[in-house]
Image: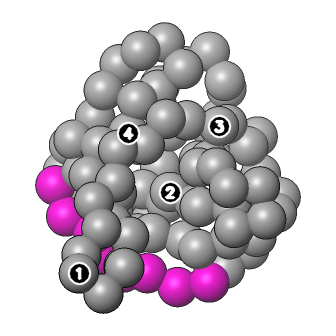
Amino acid sequence: MSKVYVDVTAKFDKDGRMEPVQVSWTDGTRYTIDKVVGVCRAASTGGGGTGIRYTCRICGRSAFIFYSEREHRWFVEGKDSARSDWIYTVI
């Protein structure tokens, strides 16, 4: 697996908490996040690096989306940067 940087649309609540609502893959395909199941600080075992890990339901599947506080950008653990099948890696 590799670290793939993606565009994410996020919302912020009145207390400043951030929650991703949509992910745009490198080819422009957009995925709506059905639900954020969990949030924790964690390491990316597949792509390397650490950040805030959001466990999400996307298209009925589980996926991790990471926010790197150090880099101030979002990434996912992709099998192949040219393919958008990262959401099919079920947790």
Q: Residues within 10 Å of mark 2 (few under 14, many from 20)?
A: many
Residue 39 on the magenta span: yes
Q: Within 10 angstroms of label 1, few (less than 14), some, or many (20 or more) residues?
A: few
Q: Return the residue found at the far right.
A: 48
Label 1 vs label 4, nearer the camera: 1
Indicate which disc, 3 or 4, sits on the residue closer to the N terminus.
3
Residue at which label 3 appears: 5
- Disc 1 to disc 4, how far (Cα)? 22 Å
Q: Is residue 84 left or right of residue 33?
A: right
Element under disc 2? strand
Closer to the camera, 79 or 31? 31
- Report if the CB atoms under discs 4 and 2 are less than 8 Å apart: yes
- Gap between marks 1 and 2, in whole Å? 22 Å
Is 44 placed above or below 85 here? below
Q: Nearer the viewer, residue 28 or 82?
A: 28
Tell me which numbered mark, 1 or 4, is placed earlier along the sequence: 1
The region drawn magenta spans 34-41
Q: Residue at x 69, y 62 (%)?
A: 68
Q: Which residue is mark 2?
A: 65
Vertically, is 17 above or below 86?
below
Q: Nearer the viewer, residue 17 or 25?
A: 17
Question: How far separated are the C-alphas under marks 1 and 3?
Answer: 27 Å
Q: Give the residue type that dot 4 points to.
A: Val
Type of amino acid at the residue the image marks with label 2: Ile
Q: Amino acid at mark 1?
A: Lys
Tell me which corner region of the image, top left, top right, bottom left or bottom right, holds residue 52: bottom right
Of the 4 image quadrants, the one containing the C terminus is bottom left
Disc 1 + disc 4, Cβ < 8 Å: no
Distance from the alpha carbon under mark 4 to that under mark 2: 9 Å
The residue indicated by pointer 4 is: 23
